[in-house]
Structure formats: structure tokens, C-alpha cells
Amino acid sequence: RSKKSSIEACVKETKYLLSFSSEDEILNMRRMTDPKLIMAMKFLGKLELGMTQIMPESAPHVMQQIIQLSLLHGMNPVSPIGFVHLGSYIAKLGDVSEGYRYVKLARLLLDK
């Protein structure tokens, strides 16, 4: 499987997960409270940043996990990292305006 098709598959799956929530619902989603999940999210956030440089073909899977955990268990300070990377991947695949929409969403989450 090529690097681009792997990214495309991850982006497609993540967008599907997000299709069940509006931007307002995401912005007003409950906060994550489980200490173990919060620690896991911190780990994933650091992993995402490192993987982008060391193993870029695997980084989209980390982004997907961050967003999936955020949608299932609530937002936390690491959640915007997942949305920024999703926006970046979407833009790299050619849809800059949609990519920007997710980066903007990440910014709004940071401001909360």
C-alpha cells in the first residue's frame, strides 16, 4: 500500500467518524475526565509529533486515534493536535479549504 493511499484511507475513516457530529457539537463536547485516557492522549500527542518526522507514513493512524478517543470520551488539551494534523493531511491530499476548516476547528478548541 502506498504512503498516499494509507493517508487517504486514514483521512476517509476519520472524516466518517466526524460525520456524526457537527462543529458546534464538537466544540461543546464534554471534557475528558478519565485520568488514564488523559495520560494516553498526552502520550499520543507526543507520539504524533515524533512520528511525523520519524515515520510519517504511520502518523495518520495516531491522528485518527486522537480524534476517535476525543469523540468517544470527550475533548482535552491534546484533541486539537489531532484536528490540526487531519487538516494538514486533507490539504496535502488537495483540498486546502477543507483542511483549513479542521485547523480552524482546532484553534477554536484551543480557545475553549
Image (tube, grey):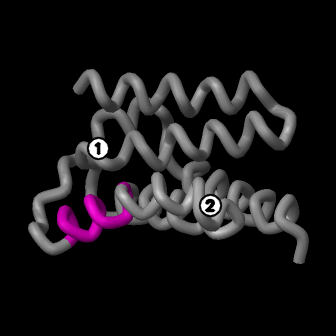
Q: Please name the residue that numbered disc 1 is placed on.
A: 29
| Residue 44 within the segment the image draws in magenta | yes
- Residue 81: % across, % down: 42, 44
Q: Residue at x 52, y 38 (%)?
A: 84
In the image shown, does 20 or 43 lie closer to the viewer? 43
| Mark in the foreground, 2 or 1 | 2
Q: Amino acid at mark 2?
A: Pro
Q: Farthest residue in the bottom direction?
A: 1
Measure the C-alpha gap from mark 2 to mark 1. 23 Å
Q: Residue at x 36, y 47 (%)?
A: 79
Quarter of the figure with residue 33: bottom left
- From this view, report whether residue 10 is shown above or below residue 111: below
Q: Please name the residue that numbered disc 2 is placed on.
A: 60
* Earlier-in-chain disc, 2 versus 1: 1
- Residue 25: % across, % down: 38, 38
Q: Residue at x 78, y 39 (%)?
A: 92
In the image shown, does 44 or 8 lie closer to the viewer? 44
- From this view, report whether residue 82 is shown above or below residue 94: below
Q: Which residues are magenta?
A: 37-45
Quarter of the figure with residue 24: top left
| Residue 41 within the segment the image draws in magenta | yes
- Residue 99: % across, % down: 67, 32
Secondary structure mainly formed by the magenta segment: helix
In the image, which disc is placed on residue 71? Answer: none
Q: Residue at x 65, y 38 (%)?
A: 88
Q: Secondary structure at mark 2?
A: helix
Would residue 25 appear left or right of 8 to someone viewing this image? left
